[in-house]
Each structure stands twice: as C-alpha cells, then as structure tokens.
Image (cartoon, rainbow, N blue to C red):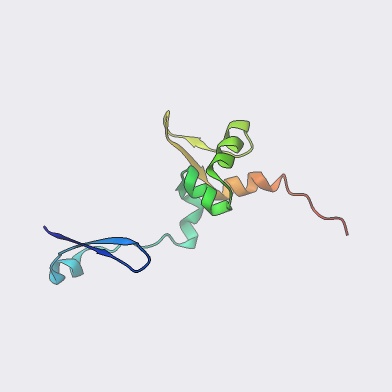
Amino acid sequence: MKKKVSESANGDVAVQNNIPSDVAESMPVAEAPSASNCSTLLLDREQLARAINVSSRTVSNWQSSGKIPFLKLSQRCVRFVLPDVLASLKRFQINAVK
C-alpha cells in the first residue's frame, strides 16, 4: 500500500494511507478517553510532566524521593495514575492566611 506524506504550513508531517472508502467506513475508530475512565489511565513520565506542567526531571526527582506514587511494571517501565499523584502532591499545599 502506498502512503502519502504531506507537510502543513507549520511544519507538521502527516502520513495518510490509501485505504478504499468502503474499507475505511467499516474500520473501528479509536475514541478519546472519556472523563469517567481517566482515573485509570496510566501515564508515563513525559505525559505526567505535561499534565501537571513540570519537567520530566522534576517527576523523576519526586519519584526517587517518594513524593509521588508510581507503578513499576518492569525494570524500565514506570507509570503514574494522575489522580493518585495529584492527591499525593496535595499534602504539600500551603494555604494562605487571611
């Protein structure tokens, strides 16, 4: 199957497959995760860093110091559950005095 490669004005590159329309219509479409199952999504270090607006190095430091919970699936595979991480970071919140 031949692939079309196109470049947009902002430099993004898109690859398109030449799939016949009748086949494409019968193919399942991946849906974005809904809000109801977001709590069970496992994020890698980069995804977590983007989600909470910190660097991946900060996430690594928090992980090694035990500030945030993580799942070690294998020697190299570490994942995070966003609600658990946010709940863990909540204990470091300092409330302003009124």
Q: Nearer the viewer, residue 83 or 92?
A: 92
**Furthest residue toward top:** 75
Return the x and y of residue 82 as percentages of the image width and height. 54, 49
Tell me which residue sits at (13%, 71%) in the image.
22
Compared across the picture, whether 45 is left or right of 65 comes to left
Tell me which residue sits at (80%, 53%) in the image.
95
Compared across the picture, whether 5 is left or right of 79 comes to left
Q: Quadrant of the C terminus?
A: bottom right
Q: Which quadrant of the view contains residue 62?
A: top right
Return the x and y of residue 91 as percentages of the image width and height. 71, 45
**Furthest residue toward right:** 98
Q: Which quadrant of the view contains residue 6?
A: bottom left
Return the x and y of residue 79 as percentages of the image width and height. 47, 40
Task: Work out whether 41 lies above or below 74.
Answer: below
Task: Work out whether 93 lies above or below 57.
Answer: below
Return the x and y of residue 59 as percentages of the image width and height. 57, 41
Q: Quadrant of the N terminus?
A: bottom left
Tell me which residue sits at (87%, 55%) in the image.
97
Tell me which residue sits at (53%, 38%) in the image.
70
